[in-house]
Image (tube, grey):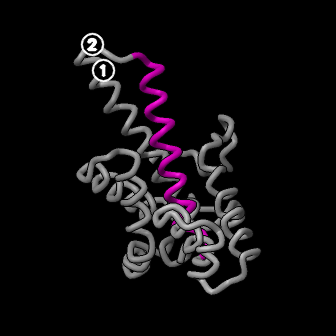
Amino acid sequence: MQQRLARGEAAALGEFYDRFASLVHGLAARVLSDERAADQITREVFGYVWENPDAYDPKQGSMRSWVAKLTQREAVQRLRQAEASSHAESGGGSPEELELKVRRASAAARADYIVTSMPAPLRAALELAYFQRRDYRQAAADLSITEDEARRRLRLGLQLLSSANTRPPEGAAPPGYGRAL
């Protein structure tokens, strides 16, 4: 797909959009809590991909991860700008409060991405435990799996989710993944 985008094939952009639009819009909306801003971020991310298809390096990870990272960075930058403007106009709020809000929104977006990216069996077990308040025994029965398998799926799903709350050190992003849009 990257090669087709680099050749300027409009059909490739359409396929790319079909594959990743809900991810991009969902992450942006989660960070910004604003549908219009999420729409704008979605347009900007796909515009960036169209204009810079060579920015993606398959050696650094999947295209999905790259697009998610682009979206998250752009949305967080937009949130910082909006909150800074809001705080400047109202004369309230400290830089620490702003940074805390940005970190929370960023962690929530990472968690959403992790859940939507995990294999369906893990996601199903977590959804039963979280949304339907099932314990591992009930989840095992609902999913027609052993209790050991239910515990394993829940443990692995929770381990994956816990990574959403850990912030990578500054500068830890792979080369080419930190460029502004």
Which residue position holds label 1?
Answer: 87
The residue sitting at 49% across, 45% down in the picture is 73
Q: Is residue 75 left or right of residue 152?
A: left
Residue 104, given in percent of the width and then of the height, sits at: 48, 38
Q: Is residue 3 left or right of residue 12?
A: right
**Toward the viewer: 164 or 57?**
164
Tag 2 and tag 1, C-beta contact below 8 Å: yes
Residue 125, given in percent of the width and then of the height, sits at: 59, 71
Which residue position holds label 2?
Answer: 91
* Residue ranking furthest to the bottom: 144
**Toward the viewer: 106 or 85?**
106
Q: Does residue 63 appear in this view?
A: no
Give neighbour class at mark 1: few <14, some 14-19, many 20+ (Cα, 10 Å). some
**Toward the viewer: 42 or 152?**
152
- Magenta stretch: residue 117 in it? yes
Q: What is the magenta range?
A: 94-119
- Magenta stretch: residue 97 in it? yes
In the displayed structure, 138 sits above or below 171; it is below
The residue sitting at 65% across, 58% down in the picture is 158
Q: Secondary structure at mark 1?
A: helix
Alpha carbon separation for disc pair 2 and 1: 6 Å
Residue 180, given in percent of the width and then of the height, sits at: 48, 44
Residue 155, given in percent of the width and then of the height, sits at: 71, 62
- Residue 151 is labelled as none
The residue sitting at 31% across, 32% down in the picture is 82
Q: Name the amino acid, label 2.
A: Gly
In the displayed structure, 167 sits above or below 125; it is above
